[in-house]
Image (spheres, helix red, strand yellow):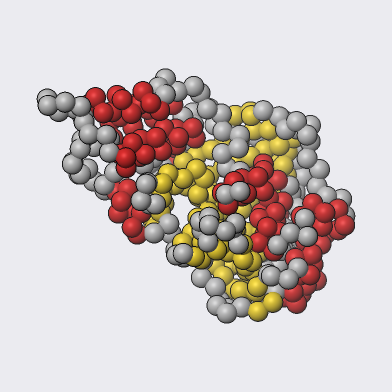
Amino acid sequence: MHTKQQIRELLGPADPARDAVVPPSPLTAHDLILRAEAATATPAGPARRGAPRRTMLVGAAAALAVLGSAGVAQVLRDVAPTGAVPAQPAAGTVLVPVAYEIVEGEPAGRHLRALAARLVDGPQDATGGRYSHHHTKSWGEPTMTSPEGHTMSYVQERRHWAADDGRQWQDDRILGVEYPDAASREYWSTRPPLETPAASPSATRPPEGAREIPSDPQVRRLPADRAELARWLGTGKPAGELAMRTYQLYSSYLVPRRTRADLLTILAEKPGFVWRGRVVDRAGRQGVAVTADLVPPTGQHPERAQMLLVFHPSTGELLAYEYLATAPKRRVLHYALMLDARRTGTVG
């Protein structure tokens, strides 16, 4: 199984693209390619069908599954004629992995147990209301990759509300584009597949704001005790997969202090977690971090990967998650920030 598919299955409800409501596109990917080629045809005949360009257009059509069919016309406008270079390169940040205080690291067990023993209440412990609310920011799904392996993806901000009866509401914003390395930024800056959305709230917030999405067919229930939590996490799996399940836990539930303490002690008992000390996440927040290696199936890329979890140093809440390829080259493949999690009395 491909590593990305493993992550999609493990993320479950936390998958940023899971509940995207997509209106039907007026053009198929094939029609989109033909129309773009016709627009760039020369008097001597149709435009040359190069493999990299075809892949780029199909990737753009796939990206519309998240951005919506309204972007189809924009794709056609943004495809440069053969041999042309856009006047303005695409904006966007080249991602740098989160820096560790302790590069070599040490077994995380005693540090996680110490954190579990001193936890204090967090926002979700002190608030009430009809709805659970998660505010997240993520990058890495979906991605667009050229035949040469150059990748780009959009940053997505999401607010999600859920009622106890399973009803759900969601408000998504696309904030901009980021790249895992400088070579990808250089490649896509001369071949922009889509116009980069503006970062201002007025330009990115859907006019309708929060919208109701299909109800969860199974009303999710937080594991009731430590034993049930251990089964939910799948403690027989490698540490890297437990790290992904930890992210899914915090993305799916409001996690009270007692459960946070149980989680930390469960992770403390699992070989493979490495203590990285103090870190600063992508939102500028101070935290403490652990990592765990993930080894994909033989012959698949990345050849080796690492999962990073950043916890609040007092409440033990998950602040951030990072999925990092370590071989054949070191680069960020996915990250998420848990900006807020609490109960509230209103939606929107």
The location of residue 272, given as percent across then percent down, is 69, 70
Q: Is residue 119 visible?
A: no
Q: In the shown orientation, is residue 71 left or right of residue 265?
A: left
Q: Say which of 224 and 9 sits in front.
A: 9
Q: Is residue 274 above or below residue 345?
A: below
Residue at 30% from the left image edge and 51% from the top image edge: 187
Q: Residue furthest left?
A: 43
Q: Is residue 69 above or below residue 18?
A: above
Q: Is residue 333 visible?
A: yes
Residue at 33% from the left image edge and 57% from the top image edge: 183
Q: Say which of 54 and 307 sits in front.
A: 54
Residue at 63% from the left image edge and 28% from the top image edge: 212
* Quarter that holds the C terminus: top right
Quarter assignment of residue 294: bottom right
Q: Residue furthest top?
A: 26
Q: Say which of 306 and 298 sits in front.
A: 298
Q: Residue furthest front?
A: 299
Q: In the shown orientation, is residue 183 left or right of residue 213?
A: left
The location of residue 244, given as percent across then percent down, is 66, 55
Numbered label tally: 0
Q: Say which of 296 and 245 sits in front.
A: 296
The location of residue 300, given as percent across then percent down, is 53, 55
Q: In the shown orientation, is residue 89 left or right of residue 153?
A: left
The location of residue 112, given as percent across then percent down, is 73, 71
Residue at 49% from the left image edge and 65% from the top image edge: 327
